[in-house]
Amino acid sequence: MLAVCGFVFVFSVLVLVYIGIPFAQQKPLRARGKHSLAWEVRRVRSWRKFRFEWGFDLWGGAGTVTVWSTSKSSEPSDNRPVVYDPEDPQRWCFSAQMPRNPARVRNWLRGFWVVAVVTLVLSIVLLVG
């Protein structure tokens, strides 16, 4: 029983780290993000990966920003929608990587947090008892 609790606890923590950290980092983008369309400026090949420089116009005609991303794909890139933080344009994300329903993701994260806490407490009780 202790091994099952340990496995479930580790699994819950890994899910929280894998999903929770990017979700928390995207919070400013969900709160005040502006949408724009990015185009490929430059492509650089670096050992089994491609680094892409993307350019996008700031909202309200405030200028253009270029940012880098890494991909394993060498397919030609079309214009892609992005969401950026107007206070820090270097903080950005492709719109496809943003969750469509943040409330649902938040509920899943809460559920995994509860499971992690319950299994940790149950493991401690099993160890003591």
Image: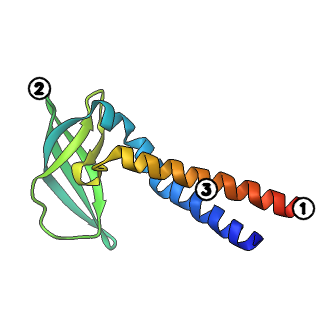
Q: Marks 3 and 2, how far apart in space?
A: 45 Å
* Image quadrant in which you'd find residue 82: top left
**Placement of 27 over or under 49, stated as above or below:** above
Return the residue nearer the eye: 116 or 90.
116
Question: Residue at 25% across / 45% down in the picture?
Answer: 67
Do labels 3 and 2 touch, CB within 8 Å?
Answer: no
- Disc 1, SS: loop
Task: Check disc 3 and report the residue beneath it.
Answer: 115
Q: Marks 1 and 3, how far apart in space?
A: 21 Å
**Placement of 122 over or under 102, stated as above or below:** below
Task: Check disc 1 and report the residue beneath it.
Answer: 129
Give percent across and percent down for residue 107. 45, 48
Look at label 1 and name its amino acid: Gly
Look at label 3 and name its amino acid: Val
Query: Please, which residue is most extreme toward the right here?
Result: 129
Which mark sits nearer the N-terminus, 3 or 2?
Answer: 2
Return the residue nearer the eye: 51 or 125.
125
Question: Residue at 31% across / 50% down in the picture?
Answer: 99
Which mark sits nearer the N-terminus, 1 or 3?
Answer: 3
* Image quadrant in which you'd find residue 2: bottom right
Q: What number is the disc on residue 60?
A: 2
Residue 104 vs residue 44: left or right? right
Look at label 2 and name its amino acid: Gly
Give percent across and percent down for residue 96. 23, 54
Return the residue nearer the eye: 15 or 37.
15
- Disc 2, SS: loop
Q: How is the image coloured?
A: rainbow
Which mark sits nearer the N-terminus, 1 or 2?
Answer: 2
Give percent across and percent down for residue 103. 37, 44
In the rendered image, the quadrant that contains the C terminus is: bottom right
Residue 58 vs residue 2: left or right? left
